[in-house]
């Protein structure tokens, strides 16, 4: 006899949808951070990947990583025991999505083509992949 899966399909689908949405939110916030920094110091390139920013413009990379840490820390501080138990999956999803964002956000920079459509397509692809992976891992 085979083992039955302990994964609840409904909870898994909500985790995946939430992971994809949170990954897109992180992308928008990283883009806004890059635009704001470019406004204060124009030589900064427009980069949404914090790890790539650390190499090309370390100040922007540090700021972007601090923003991601602040967003993850925003999810963590719940002191009530009842609410803490209910939001445990949300915390895990936010942490896995943020860590995955650091890795998967390098995908658009792995392929260098002169077309903007390719870059936008790769951004959408890494957000979907990041959300699916984070949602699945947080559901385990």
Image (cartoon, helix red, strand yellow):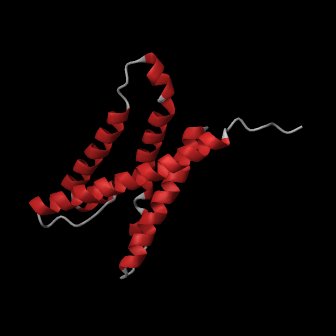
User: Could you tell me which residue is drawn at 49 percent across and 54 percent down?
Assistant: 130
- The percent position of residue 78, horizontal first and vertical second, equals 37, 24
Which of the two residues, 11 or 59, is positioned nearer the viewer here?
11
Q: Residue at 55% across / 52% down in the picture?
A: 132
**Figure quadrant of residue 66:** top left
Residue sitting at x 47%, y 30%: 87
With 43 as the anchor, is 88 left or right in this view? Answer: right
User: Closest to the observer: 36 or 65?
Assistant: 36
Residue 89 x %, y %: 51, 34
Left or right of residue 64, residue 78 in this image: right
- Most extreme residue toward the top, as rendered? 81
Say if residue 112 shows up in the picture: no
Quarter of the image holding residue 56? bottom left
Q: Residue at x 47, y 19 (%)?
A: 82
25 displayed left or right of 89 = left
Asked whether 100 or 79 is in front, the reply is 79
The answer, for residue 52, to whether it is visible in the render is: yes
């Amino acid at each position: 006899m085979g083992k039955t899966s302990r994964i609840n399909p409904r909870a898994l689908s909500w985790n995946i949808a939430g992971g994809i949405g949170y990954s897109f939110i992180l992308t928008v916030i990283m883009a806004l951070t890059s635009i704001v920094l470019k406004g204060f110091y124009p030589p900064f390139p427009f980069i949404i990947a914090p790890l790539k920013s650390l190499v090309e413009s370390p100040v922007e990379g540090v700021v972007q990583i601090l923003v991601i840490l602040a967003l993850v820390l925003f999810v963590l501080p719940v002191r009530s025991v009842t609410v803490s138990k209910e939001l445990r999956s949300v915390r895990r999803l936010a942490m896995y999505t943020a860590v995955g964002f650091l890795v998967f956000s390098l995908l658009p920079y792995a392929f260098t083509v002169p077309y903007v459509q390719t870059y936008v397509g790769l951004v959408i692809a890494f957000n979907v992949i990041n959300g699916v992976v984070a949602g699945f891992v947080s559901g385990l």
